[in-house]
Image (cartoon, grey):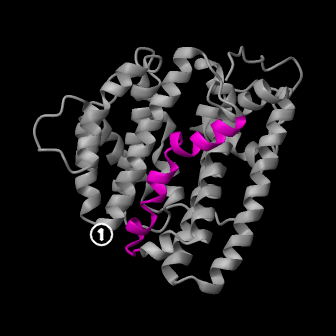
Amino acid sequence: MVTTFTNPLGRHPLRIPPLDCPFPSEINPHVDEANQESFAWLLRTGMIEDARQLDVYRQAKFGWLTARAYPRVDRDMLRLLMDWCVWLFAFDDGFCESELLSRRTALIAQALPDMFRVLHDLDSGGELTNVFARTLRELKERIAVHAEPDQLDRWSTATKEYIFAQVWEAANRETQAVPTPEDYIFMRRRTGAMYPVYALIDIAGGYRLTPEEWHHPDIRELTEHANDLVVWDNDLFSYAKEREHDRARHNLVNVLITHRGYALQEALDEVAGMHDRAVERMVELRASVEKWGSQGVLDYTLGLEHWVRGHIEYSLNSARYIHAWPSNTYWPAMADRGRVEADRA
């Protein structure tokens, strides 16, 4: 790991490369009302109190990401899933990336016990001092209503791994280190919070993958590729925004610039190439799964595809990402539509 000073966006126009994505694009019809209710829930929890940041959340409409990722669940389940995704955004923005905490590994580590007690069923039900732990307890209780014990355990384990991975990120910030590509890809699968949301796909759909199905090599590889795709695509779209915070230290584009000597456009193109290769492999794995998988396995695979495509659609319609890039940045056709819709929001 080495210290970096991220390259500027440059004087020449940049091109956001197109991303191959043959997966279906859908959106849940309950998105509007569920998004309004989820934002009201965020206000009640007290996780985000800064007025400016709350306004950012209101305009970002994070519920639209959830609605694209889970387009076929009913209204009540969509609301629960939105609240969980909002918790993840709030934890990341208000806790992991706050100026006070994000650079102080010890402060983040000291907040772990309450959350781990909740996730390990060691919570006595008493007063929790950490607002994120209190809200996590509420969400776990709501998820447990719909989940079998092994499903809840998958979600709890994935969530614990995500929370603990934030200590790794904080340590990098504290030491001004940029992880190697190998370390970054490995840890990004944990810091990106995709395993905790993927663990909810079968719960939300009202079915259950058996332990044998969950641990089948095809399903593990599909899940890993779907994880990589969402976090890599996020790094691609959000690079300009993340340069404003921590110099994009934890961003694949910057990791490639720092350790492989790429120019910015070369790094953007390389991330897009990695994306296309992962999509190609997911298509191959779906063909394999169709030969042996149950309906639940096929539904889970579709759920992963919804997440990959839904994240792209949401990001290309998000002023949160698009407006951080220079105005002369070239976007592919899908992004041009996204820029117009973001301007109208």
Please give the residue where the numbered disc 1 appears in the rendered image.
148
Q: Is residue 223 left or right of residue 122?
A: right
Q: Residues within 10 Å of mark 1 (few under 14, many from 20)?
A: few
* Residue at 77% across, 42% down: 271
State the extent of the magenta-drawn residues as a range. Answer: 181-208
* Residue at 49% across, 58% down: 198
Check residue 260 for magenta coloring. no
Residue in the foreground of this view, choosing between 143 and 261 = 261
Residue 234: x %, y % from top left: 63, 41
Q: Is residue 170 left or right of residue 237?
A: left
Check residue 206 for magenta coloring. yes
120 in relation to 145, above or below: above
296 in relation to 49, above or below: below
* Amino acid type, label 1: Glu
Residue 170: x %, y % from top left: 49, 24
* Residue at 36% across, 27% down: 109
Residue 8: x %, y % from top left: 77, 16
Quarter of the picture containing the N terminus is: top right
Q: Is residue 115 left or right of residue 256?
A: left
Residue 285: x %, y % from top left: 69, 71
Quarter of the picture containing the C terminus is: top right
Residue lying farthest to the right in this orientation? 12
Find residue 95 and report its image quarter. top left
SS for callout 1: loop
Q: Is residue 180 left or right of residue 117?
A: right
* Residue at 43% across, 69% down: 202
What secondary structure characterizes most of the magenta part?
A: helix
Exactly how many numbered labels are in the figure?
1
